[in-house]
Image (cartoon, rainbow, N blue to C red):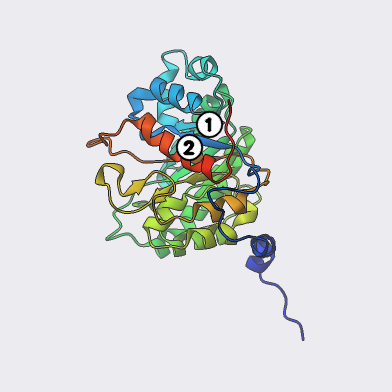
Amino acid sequence: MTRPFTRRELLFGAAGMTAAAVCPPLFAAPARKLQIHIGYTGITWMNDQIEQAVDSVSSLGFYGFETFGDVLSKWKARGGLAPVLKAKNLPLISGYCTVNLTDASRKEEQLAKAKEWCGLIKECGGRIFVVGPNPVKRVTYDFAASKSGIVSMLNDLAKTVEQEGLTPVLHQHTGTCIESRDETYAVLEAVDTRHLKFGPDVGQLTKGGQDAVKVVKDFLPIVQHMHLKDFDGNDDHLLGYCPLGRGKVDVPAILKLMDGRKISGMVMVELDNDFKNPSSTPSADLAKQSRDYLKSIGVGFRG
């Protein structure tokens, strides 16, 4: 007798078919250009260097920009970030917004804050609300006890963000209430993915010892945004991350999965910089190194 499909098999079956079509890694002389637009997040610059970040990201030919919801809030008093972006012809794609998912007593406050961030993202033409889970003390954190509350909050948050006209995507993050592979899978298999989508950070997955390519394959049908980051564990100024192509992340395989897909957001290059002890390499140079690598494997840029 044929057994019924499980919920997970129905949800992720399409990902398996897509993954089967993945070719071997791309080489330095690609046969064709990848059908994909790449943006860049502002985290490589300090938060008070947002104008320099916008200028560099635009001049390097990236297709979009991401910054923090808190940065957008601070710029509101200065007339908003939209004029800065418009002057450089660089669209805002997304805002990264940290939301407390574990404290149920703060739900209404957090949903109200999310609405405020949605308005700021929309004012700049953005379309993605990146859900950053709240930090927790990992040594004492009990995910099993917190899971149901996290899922409930995410479902309410996703519907709130959708009602504001944006696409909410969950971004798993080290040091937060959704960090590990098992936590990521458990949450994404429990939430209502008709509303909440996935915006994986492939560098953080790799830093945590996970197979980033497999995670993206498994959840490909709901991947609507991405932080494309590499990790080699060498440079503390960059929190162990590195420009693309120099670390352990199989960037060509990740991009092959995303090649030609129409998503709500964008694949955003990201490279962390320790705000307390930043790299001596200029942020624009770090971004250029990733841009040059991507060009070498078939990614096109503006200009």
Q: Residue at x 27, y 47 (%)?
A: 235
The one nearer the camera, 115 or 218, is 218
Amino acid type at mark 2: Arg
Residue 13 at x, y percent in the picture? 68, 65
Q: Look at the image and tell me whether residue 173 can be seen.
A: no
For mark 2, give the secondary structure: helix
Q: Which mark is residue 62?
A: 1
Q: Which residue is mark 2?
A: 291
In the picture provided, is 12 more to the left or to the right than 129? right
In the picture provided, is 163 more to the left or to the right than 86? right
Q: Quadrant of residue 205?
A: bottom left
Amino acid type at mark 1: Phe
Q: Residue furthest left?
A: 277
Q: Quadrant of residue 169?
A: top right
In the picture, which quadrant includes the C terminus? top right
Question: Compared to 63, does 227 lie above or below?
Answer: below
Q: Quadrant of residue 18?
A: bottom right
